[in-house]
Image (spheres, grey):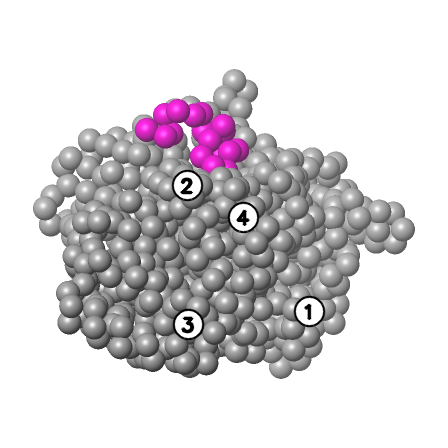
Amino acid sequence: MPLPYRGRGSRLASSRGASTSVHSPRRAGRGAPSSSHALRLTRRRHSSEQVPPGPEPQADFRSGKWLQEHAGGDARDSQQTARAGMGSRHRICSQEEVVIPCDSDNDSGSVDLQLSNLEDIKKDPSSLELTDSDIFDITGLSQESFIYSYRHLTQQGPDNEANVERLIQSIQEVFNGELQSEFEKLTFLRSLSSLSQTLPYDETTESFIHSHITDIVHVLNMLIEEEPLHSLFSSVRQEVFITIANLSYQDIHLLFGSEDRADLFSLITKSIIALPSVETLIQLQEIMPSGSYNTECLYRQTFQAFSEMLQSLVVKDPHLENLDTIFKQMDPWLQSTKDHERERATASMAQVLKCLSRHLSLKLPLRFQRLGHFVALMALLCGDSVTEVAEEAAEGMHCLLHVTLRLKCTIYDKKNHPNLRRAMKKCQELLELYSIKQFYSCPFKIAQIFEAFLNSNELFQFVMTTLDGLENLKHPCTQKSAGELLITMVKNAESRFEKVPEIMGVICARLSIISQPRVRRQIINTVSLFISRPKYTDIVIGHLLCHPVPYDRHLAELWRTLEVELPSTTWILWRLLRKLQKCHNEPTHEKMAYVAVAATDALYEVFVGNRLQAATFRLFPQLLMTLLIQIHHSIGLTMSDVAVPSGLYTEQEMSSEVTPLCFAIQATKSLLLRTLCWQEFNIMEKNKGWTLLEGKECHLQGVSLLANALLERNHLLAHKVMYLLVPLLNRGNDKHKLTSAGFFVELLQSPVARRLPSIYSIVRLKDWLHHGNRVFKFLALRGLRYLIKHQDMREDIRSLLPCILDLLCETDEKIVLLAIQILLQLVGTMDFTTLTAMMKTLFTLFGDVLPTACRV
């Protein structure tokens, strides 16, 4: 709805104590209902109070009478000086009630979303029209117009043209000179404000102001800079705010559009928000009495003018670009560590949102791109330790929901219509559970409602702003609110997030500063939610593996205390395991991938925490073999042999005591203990099995020892490992194959080995007999020695006699001895020709330098 121009009787006159007050019908009579909670809050803290009038009558510097009188003589005339000075002082505190604009209606009632309106949306999305009743009913906002209605300007007669000329002349003199006294400053500001009222009908005024915007901004900037930040002894600030507001209502914005205007906006915001607290100002007045103003009353009048100035900027803001600018200016103050600054900023934004919600008329394109950040910041303020801040923020959230709904209905398209409908329905269902006051005082309920309306980019903004709230160490309640907001938003938004690595980065950085156990638990649970969703599992794991090892106590706690639902545990552990397994496919001559070391340490922390116990049992075969292969790869390496990402460590942080091998050994030990393989663990301890595993020449002996211990004490797990190894024996690099083959061969002692198809047993061992690596030949003979005990497999093994006879000529003593042992088992099944060939070869061994071969 287009707004009429503001007349000379501006509502801003109330900030100066205008001679009449305009009241809304609701409060006109004595029996009218009480004003809203927001009104009571604002009046109590930031409005002027009733003060006995001064001895002189008030002067209304916006009246036409003053305009004529001012035009009729020099502004520096002594009579005018006395009159203006008298008025400027005594109108600061008036006897009349100051009415706060934009007060909301009773907010304790239920909320009706009027979903039926969505049923009638036409197929063409561009034809969507959302009536005021739809959205006002959603948030409980009244449809009544501003308490202060705008009046049309009355066309001035020809006699006022001279008055305009004199005003322009007096203002022009200021551009060419200086303002010394407070009176001169106030006169200039009031002349400029009065001149702005003639803009709708005077082309001369319009031309003058538009051509001197830079000069006006410069003078206002100078006036504000001259005002002290530690005290408030004049009404210059108040007049600057009123002047800017009056020009804004005439579509002349002094705070937008260029760098110098943005600087002015920043300066005037700081000039009011950064003032000392009211208590300090009052104490300062007692120490340094000004004799002119009541400091407390002057402050409240000044703050009221500032609040109304901000509201004037959003009355006509169809693209929300003014709101975006205001929020950017107020953002640091909303997060101030000083309570009184945070309260002022929150009260100002609450009033801006109330004004905007009542005059919302959106048009595309919308330029407010920080909705997620705004929602999160206001939600954090709803949990502020200062009661007044929390209450003001709750009022602001009430109106922000209204703005959000209108915004989303404006930008939605046909494809998103079902999503919008679902969001509206969810909003209705949640709001019906709580009263408005209860809802806005509970951060997690706010997250539940707004989640439905935020897109992926806005969700990212929300999460990042909430994480910033964790840095507020001075106010533990803010950390508490941030934890609740974060876990609720991530839980409800499911898989709609983007830039998850950035989120994980901030979470990991914030863990060290969170001391509250409940909040730490919520943050870690947030990571658990992300990692348990298949869309984000690899992303989260990949980011967590990019931290220095061994992990610090905060990341170690994260890995150990992951809270994941049972169906997701196997998936998470499997994806972590795959990170390590992929590294085993790389050539052995290259540097070890850092991910391999980090994943091994992560597995250790997961085993220690034992939160994924069910998955650990289920994936035991894969975990055990992967860790044994990692041990083989890590033998003899230091961290300098690892491809560590640049910048991850400093030279001082890189300890020589930390090696890839120590991570692999400790992970394997913890795996055995967490899967109740205590006897196997003890066997390894008593027989120095861990030392064997760490040795370059005796690694396979350690593997054999562990395989035999597992087969002896837990044959069910041993059989699972054997079946796992069947398809893996020919995969990976040489170290991968050797470790797998060494474990597999020992398991062939089990009776279950008879069930394996010959292609996976006899045929595979035959291939190894021809392998170029002597270790594989040794393992093949060892496996054949185990299998020959099974009578039904001897015939297949007998077909390998030519290959076995050839191995008698090997120089490796172990290979020759194993070949002889197998041949002795097959003597009774040999034909004459084979037996003759064997004997000839054996006769040559009697003169062998190897005494063991001679004895056999």
To which residue does mark 2 refer? 714
Q: Quadrant of residue 637?
A: bottom right
Q: CA distance from mark 4 to mark 3?
A: 31 Å
**Range shown magenta:** 429-445
- Real-space Cα separation, disc 2 to disc 1, in angstroms: 82 Å
Q: Secondary structure at mark 2?
A: loop
Within-10-Å neighbours for mark 1: few <14, some 14–19, many 20+: some
Spatial CA distance of label 4 from label 1 is 81 Å
**The label number, if any, that marks residue 683 in the structure image:** 4
Residue to which mark 3 is pinned: 853
Q: Give the residue at mark 1.
A: 225
Residue type, label 2:
Asn
Front-most of 287 and 212?
Answer: 287
- Check disc 1 and report its element: helix, strand or loop: helix
- Secondary structure beneath disc 4? helix
Count of numbered circles in the view: 4
Q: Nearer the viewer, mark 3 or mark 2?
A: 3
Tag 1: amino acid: Glu
Between the C-alphas of marks 4 and 2, the distance is: 13 Å
The x, y position of residue 773, in whole percent, is: 34, 77
